[in-house]
Amino acid sequence: MVEQILIAFCTFPDLNTARKVANEIIDLRLAACGNILSPIHSIYRWKGKLESSEETLVMFKLEAKRYADFEAKLRSLHPYEVPEIISIKVESGLPDYLQWVAESCAT
């Protein structure tokens, strides 16, 4: 039986930072993989002001039971004061792929 799988999203200020953090997260088995999408354009309100910037998005795949450790490590590595770290549950997917995610996150 495959554990609950999550997709976690996190934006970074640039491609190099995203790569460095994704490599460390995956090396620690906190996520099975990270898909890097760059550039993206983000529009948001920060400290009462409308902001706009180029960023890099990473989509991590991980087991739900590893989420707390994943979030703590990601936050410690992230340069933003309040990083975007959000996740959604995977409701269905190719069983072999979901099994691979679970095995890749095994400690």
Image (spheres, helix red, strand yellow):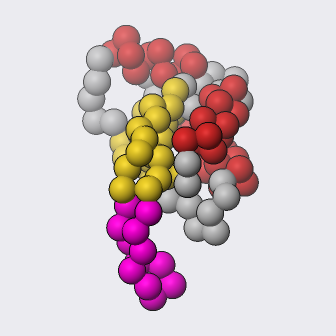
Residue 72 showing in the rendered view = no
The residue lying at 55 percent from left, 54 percent from top is 13
Q: Residue 9 at x, y = what percent?
A: 44, 47
Number of numbered labels in the structure image: 0
In this image, 91 relative to 71: left or right?
A: left
Compared with 1, 51 (above or below) is: below
Residue at image coords 66%, 54%: 78
What range is drawn magenta here? Answer: 42-53
Asked if residue 92 lies left or right of residue 33, the reply is left
| Above or below, comparing residue 54 to residue 31 in the picture | below
**Where does residue 52 sit, x and y in percent of width and height?**
40, 68
Horizontal and vertical percent position of residue 86: 45, 54
Q: Determine the image quadrant of residue 24.
A: top right
Residue at position x 36%, y 42% in the image: 89
The structure residue drawn at horizontal position 57% and vertical position 19%, both measured from the top left corner, is 104
Is 94 left, or right, of 32 in this rendering? Answer: left
Nearest the eye: 49 or 92: 49
Asked if the magenta segment contains residue 46, the reply would be yes
Q: Is residue 21 above or below residue 14?
A: above
- The overriding secondary structure of the stretch rendered in magenta is strand
**3 left or right, relative to 70:** left
Query: On the image, which quarter does residue 107 sit in?
Result: top right
Report the quarter where the N terminus lies.
top left
Q: Is residue 38 visible?
A: yes
Does the magenta portion include 64?
no
Closer to us: 69 or 75: 75
For the residue pair 40 and 72, the one nearer the viewer reads as 40
**x and y percentages locating residue 2 in the rendered image:** 43, 22
